[in-house]
Image (cartoon, rainbow, N blue to C red):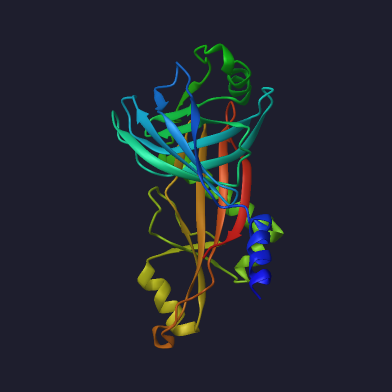
Amino acid sequence: MIGFVILLMTLIPVLDIPHSGRARIEPVTPLNFISVPVRINSTTADCSSVVSYVDYSISNNSGDDINIVELEVYSVDPNGKFSKLDTITAEDLITAGSTQNGRLTLEPVDSRSRLVLTLKRAVTNSGLWVIDGESINTALRNLSKNELSRGGKFFPNLIVTNSDQEELFQMALSNILQDPAKKEKLQNQKRLIFSDQGLYFNTKDSSDTSILRPEDIQEIAEREGRVLYLNFRPLTIQGSQVFAKITLREALPRQRRIASQYKYAYGFVFVKGQDHWVISKSIVYAQD
């Protein structure tokens, strides 16, 4: 028996289990561009074979609040070959002149690679800072030279008038009625009903639509048992692009005392040509 125990103790070191989840702290190289007044400060990565976390801070040196930042994380191997690991969008307010901390979550990272964090976009109240892909690639190729990275442009927000909003509203409505995938969500309701909430421009009822107050929409639901209605959300302007969202909701009688689960949204991206607006992208998707 004693011999068996000694033999077992001898074998245990051979059956060593690696600490696969053991973390290591790695420095992360911030990639900044001299023409962009947004700075990524010193960053670190807490890496393991399970997950990696990148802690960073961003300083807003512009004279305007930042509402959205889009960051890109790259991996650079010992030979200088780089690949993009992830793109992360953070919708956190960074007031003018302030610094804000954040954390990114990544898949496991090769310990032999160098991590680089760079800004891709910053959305401010007055416009959009963008660093194009070629400028980022050039900066990544020149990492070893310790040169100041150049690139990045500012695109001031378009001015959208009440007349423009009315035109975009009609374009979106027409697209919904003509696109089978979008129209299907309306479930053959004969008349489209819009809530007047969010309509910050002048528009009137037409042969296809009715503009009603929320209490009037609820009254129809009480009378007919159910009604679908649309809500035009405030436009978001990012440089030369205008983003519009129309939500589709279901109103039910109050006596049913259940929350409707029928929730969809139509998303549109508009750009302006020389003399007219164009829908550059549109989508319909379910909402939680």
Residue placed most toward the observer, 96 or 284:
96
Image quarter for residue 101? top left
Q: Quadrant of the N terminus?
A: bottom right
Furthest residue toward front: 2
**Residue 177 visible in the displayed image:** yes
**Residue 159 visible in the displayed image:** no
The residue lying at 40 percent from left, 78 percent from top is 219
Q: Residue 223: horizontal and vertical position, in percent?
A: 45, 84
Q: Residue 227: horizontal and vertical position, in percent?
A: 51, 75
* 183 up-or-down from 49: above or below: below
Q: Residue 23: horizontal and vertical position, in percent?
A: 51, 46
The residue lying at 51 percent from left, 21 percent from top is 152
Residue placed most toward the observer, 17 or 141:
17
* 102 up-or-down from 36: above or below: below
Left or right? Give the position of 46 relative to 18.
left
Residue placed most toward the observer, 58 or 134:
58
The residue lying at 52 percent from left, 13 percent from top is 146
Q: How many marks?
A: 0
Left or right? Give the position of 107 relative to 179.
left
Image quarter for residue 160? top left
Q: Residue 278: horizontal and vertical position, in percent?
A: 61, 38
